[in-house]
Image (tube, rainbow, N blue to C red):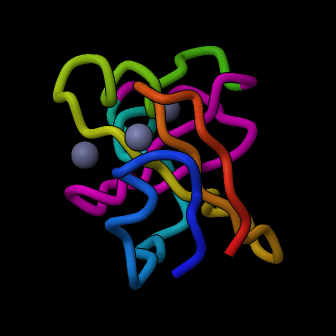
């Protein structure tokens, strides 16, 4: 794999895809979301920072899981929170 600028992105060789296209936390509280992200550590799909509840970022902060992938159809990118590193795949 090409050098992606952080060890977390470098460690990913198969990208976890969303199991379901909904935010696992928003569904519980009846909230709306804008875009979805999938945690590459545990596979949970949560909402993006454009969504009111920022569940993907809260999950990363709370768990230390560093990398998310876009769960939007047609988007193929990864983002590492601790390194603020972004790459397409
Ligand atoms: Zn990283
Ligand atoms: Zn959410
Ligand atoms: Zn996770």
State whether the magenta stretch is mostly helix, strand or loop: loop
Which sits in the foreground, 24 or 48?
48
The region drawn magenta spans 29-50
Q: Residue at x 66, y 46 (%)?
A: 86
Determine whether, in the image, residue 2 is placed left or right of residue 81: right
* Image quadrant assignment for residue 21: bottom right
The count of marks equals 0
Q: Residue at x 24, y 56 (%)?
A: 41
Which sits in the foreground, 65 or 54?
65
Q: Residue at x 40, y 84 (%)?
A: 14
Residue 48 magenta-drawn? yes
Which sits in the foreground, 24 or 78?
78
Question: Most extreme residue toward the right, as rendered?
Answer: 74
Determine whether, in the image, residue 50 is placed left or right of residue 65: right
Question: Most extreme residue toward the front, as rendered?
Answer: 3
Q: Position of residue 25 (x, y in %)?
A: 36, 35
Q: Position of residue 45 (x, y in %)?
A: 42, 54
Question: In this rendering, is residue 49 above or below 33?
Answer: above
Which sits in the foreground, 1 or 17?
1
Q: Position of residue 6 (x, y in %)?
A: 46, 46
Question: In this rendering, is residue 71 above or below 14?
Answer: above
Question: In this rendering, is residue 29 above or below 37?
Answer: above
Question: In this rendering, is residue 18 above or below 38?
Answer: below
Q: Residue at x 76, y 74 (%)?
A: 73
Determine whether, in the image, residue 39 is placed left or right of residue 1: left
Residue 41 magenta-drawn? yes
Q: Position of residue 61 (x, y in %)?
A: 30, 18
């Amino acid at each position: 794999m090409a050098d992606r600028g952080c060890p977390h992105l470098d460690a990913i060789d198969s990208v976890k895809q969303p199991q379901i296209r909904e935010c696992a936390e928003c569904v519980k509280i009846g909230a709306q979301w804008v875009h979805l992200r999938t945690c590459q550590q545990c596979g949970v799909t949560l909402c993006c920072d454009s969504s009111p509840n920022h569940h993907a970022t809260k999950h990363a902060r709370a768990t230390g899981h560093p990398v998310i992938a876009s769960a939007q159809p047609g988007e193929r990118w990864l983002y590492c929170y601790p390194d603020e590193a972004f790459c397409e795949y």
